[in-house]
Amino acid sequence: MSHRLVALCLLMSASQALWAAEPDLNLCLAHPILGDRWTIHEVVELTEARVPSVPACNDAAAWEKYATKLRADVLDRIVYRGEAASWRDAKTRVEWLETSPGGNGYHIKKLRYEALPGMWIPALLYEPEKLTGKVPVVMNVNGLDPVGKAAKYKQIRCINQAKRGMIALNVEWFGMGQLRTDGFVHERMNQIDLCGSSGLAPFYLSMKRGLDVLLSLDHADPERVAVTGLSGGGWQTIFISALDTRVTLTDPVAGYSSFKTRSRHVKDLGDPEQTPTDLATLADYTHLTALMAPRATLLTFNAKDDCCFEAGYALPPLLNAAEPIFRLYGKETYLRYHVSHVPGTHAYEKDNREALYRMVGDFFYPDEAHYDAHEIPCDDEIKTKEQLAVDLPADNLDFHALAVRLSKDLPRNGSPPADRADAEKRRKTGREKLREIVRATDWTVQADADGDDGSGDGRGGVTPPLQIRYWRLRLGDDWTVPAVALWRGEPKRTAVLICDGGRRSAAADVDRLLQDGARVLAIDPFDFGEAKPIYPGGDAREPKYASNSEWELQLATVGERSLGIQASQVAAVARWARSRDKAGPVVVVSSGPRTTLIALVAGALEETAIDAVELHGSAGSLKERIERNEAFDAAPEAFCFGLLEAFDVKQLAGLCAPRPVRFVEPSERIKVEMAELKKWYAAFGSDFDPLQ
């Protein structure tokens, strides 16, 4: 064998040995840094600390002043945000349809009314055959029951109310019964939020208009107005009753708990309407309970609730908050509670219904000696859902259609800048506006090393030339970001890498960046990878973990925005990376439609430490979320309240100019949407093309 051939064989053997020593990137990236409960602990600590407590008041007059302002603030700043103010001011339209026999002593009138222009609610009015003078009226709302207003337990309740001389309104709820459509799925209300208008408003207006209908009736007694419902209907009951003082008696059944309670009992976290954006910056459900004073209030819970809001933990904080306020009015007996043990599960069955009848007897019929709170049998009067169906317009507006309409002309002022002066001005004002919308925070990083796999100690099979270090990056007092740093030799730049699948899914991206000479800092921002707020174990009756979108809702209701948390984390990590020796330029690299949005917002907010943004798999527009009729849990951070009103993907990229923003392998939608983006760069004197 020639000397040249021997040398070649030796070289190949050495190369194979070196390759064999290379680590398994998947194992390295999966190395645990935080552990199971780290992020969930941070979420619980932050949200609990932000939820306000009911203030102490010395007398009823002081409370009345506080309560009046609180109601106004919740309505103006939470319920009627954006276009919802115009929906509030619209006239209530009601259309009465056919009347049919109900049963002994009452009939049923079918009707529909508009919650807001174009959004019709089907309803049934149970009315006694013989009416004289003014009589009590009751609005019966329902929760997450697929058959909606036709649910047997709800029909029985309405029938019993009518047989006792009351007028009962049975209203349909969004996503249930006749409104059980994709466009009315509750998690799609956040499409409206994205457009800068309140997705909560249709829920509230549906209830408010229902009361309008009842109180417009000739025989309605405005001094005897009740609301009651189960589960989501319990939430509706306390929400409308607390904020609309026309309600004089309320009985929410197994429908709510304090935000502080929910953090410890994750099955209570609830849907978007129950955890609306920014509500807990003003009020907790303890406040809403106290706002009932001095009106008649029955809090009904179930002892063994297999869904949520168990009496043992949900009821005490509500009573503790409300009792002192009722005491100020000398109306302690007006606040009552009932805990059902029969069956004691998530239900509004006979035991709970008779508790309502007793409450109604005490407050609406106190002088009638013959009033009987026992349930009147009526099983033979129950109707089918087909018999109770109400005609609705074929083009009835839903959450999705409303969001499509609202998004049509958004964002406002989204055109390119005219010149450099205009570009500089808009970059400054745009960055300030973006910080406000996403609630950005400038954190400093305290870095704690969590191991080093670059010493050739055999851990994970890792030896040089690849260096690996694990970090826990503490951001202020709120958050911890897990990070894996990987590099070879003397890197030319630093890439902060975020991926939709978390850092464990990033091996291919890491390998590509390493081969390109970058130091890679693979991190998991909040709600990704190891930083998902998973709640393991716990009570056997608890689910293993709440969906991550519910924690995002919990953060939003206390005034945070998950998009702002995530982007601020990325920006803080970029500043920390930039401050280290020989970091070189810092580029944020993202992979997937969720993290590309986070990277763009981080780049727009942090103009000093982030030198470039590289996007793989980006959406072309935030409107795609609405066009695909996505629910909130598909990408919670993308439904940031009011984001689309001011910015779309193009405008966010424009805020990064003149720094490079690269859309790698752009989709056709991106090519169309970003066609004008070059003009942002041209205004700064740059001929950079983000699509090249």
Image (cartoon, grey):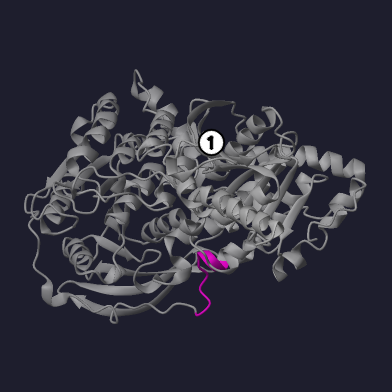
Q: Which residue is mark 1?
A: 454
Residue 140 placement, left or right of 447: left
The kind of residue on which mark 1 rests is Gly
> Is the N terminus in the top left, top right, bottom left or bottom right quadrant?
bottom right
Depth order, front residue of 276/638: 638
Q: Quadrant of residue 610?
A: top right
Q: Residue furthest front?
A: 1
Q: Residue at x 9, y 49 (%)?
A: 341
Q: Position of residue 671 (x, y in %)?
A: 76, 66
- Which secondary structure is most common in the magenta stretch? loop
> Is the C terminus in the top left, top right, bottom left or bottom right quadrant?
bottom right
Q: Residue furthest top?
A: 58
Q: Residue at x 29, y 24 (%)?
A: 328
Magenta-colored span: 394-401
Residue 316 placement, left or right of 552: left
Q: Secondary structure at mark 1?
A: loop
Depth order, front residue of 514/617: 514
Can residue 113 be seen here? yes
Q: Position of residue 646 (x, y in %)?
A: 70, 49
Q: Residue at x 84, y 53 (%)?
A: 416
Depth order, front residue of 477/97: 477
Are there few (<14), some (14-19), or many (20+) residues within 10 Å of tag 1? Answer: some
